[in-house]
């Protein structure tokens, strides 16, 4: 499936997802590892979301994926 489809599945068709859903997506997709802890996932979420927001949209989600990809290199 595409990244957009994956986002939609975890966001349950919504255009945004909160930190809890984002963390679950990262866990289910095996992003969380020795190099990438659950705390780091939370920090990345905080980094890509708007300051006062509690959720991220697909564009911000893509930015988070890029950050994780950079960490994996």
Image (tube, helix red, strand yellow):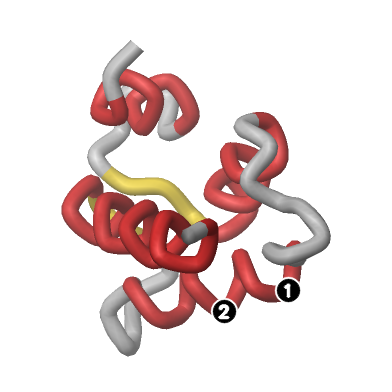
Residue at disc 1, secondary structure? helix
Residue 72, above or below 50: above
Q: Which residue sits furthest left? A: 59
Q: Nearer the viewer, residue 5 or 29?
A: 29
Give the mark count.
2
At horizontal 48% and vertical 29% (from top left) the residue drawn is 10
At horizontal 27% and vertical 61% (from top left) the residue drawn is 63
Report the disc number at residue 39: 1
Q: Which residue sits furthest right? A: 34
Left/right placement of residue 47 relative to residue 62 reads: right
Categorize mark 1 by other alpha carbons within 10 Å: few (<14), some (14-19), many (20+).
few
Cβ–Cβ below 8 Å for labels 1 and 2?
Answer: yes
Categorize mark 2 by other alpha carbons within 10 Å: few (<14), some (14-19), many (20+).
few
The N terminus sits in image quarter: top left
Residue 19, above or below 27: below
At horizontal 77% and vertical 53% (from top left) the residue drawn is 33
Residue at disc 2, secondary structure? helix
Report the disc number at residue 17: none
Residue 49, above or below 8: below
At horizontal 40% and vertical 65% (from top left) the residue drawn is 70
Residue 40 x/y as whole percent: 65, 73
Q: Which residue sits furthest top? A: 1
Left/right placement of residue 54 relative to residue 53 reads: right
Q: CA distance from mark 1 to mark 2?
A: 6 Å
* Residue bearing the label numbered 2: 43
Residue 5 x/y as whole percent: 30, 19
Q: Nearer the viewer, residue 36 or 3?
A: 36
Residue 15 x/y as whole percent: 24, 39
Residue 29 x/y as whole percent: 61, 32
Q: Which residue sits furthest front? A: 73
């Amino acid at each position: 499936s595409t990244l957009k489809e994956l986002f939609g599945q975890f966001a349950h068709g919504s255009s945004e997802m909160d930190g809890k859903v984002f963390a679950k997506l990262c866990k289910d997709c095996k992003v969380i590892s020795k190099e990438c802890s659950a705390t780091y996932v939370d920090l990345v979420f905080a980094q890509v979301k708007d300051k006062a927001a509690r959720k991220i949209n697909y564009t911000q989600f893509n930015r988070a994926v890029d950050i994780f990809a950079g960490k994996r290199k």
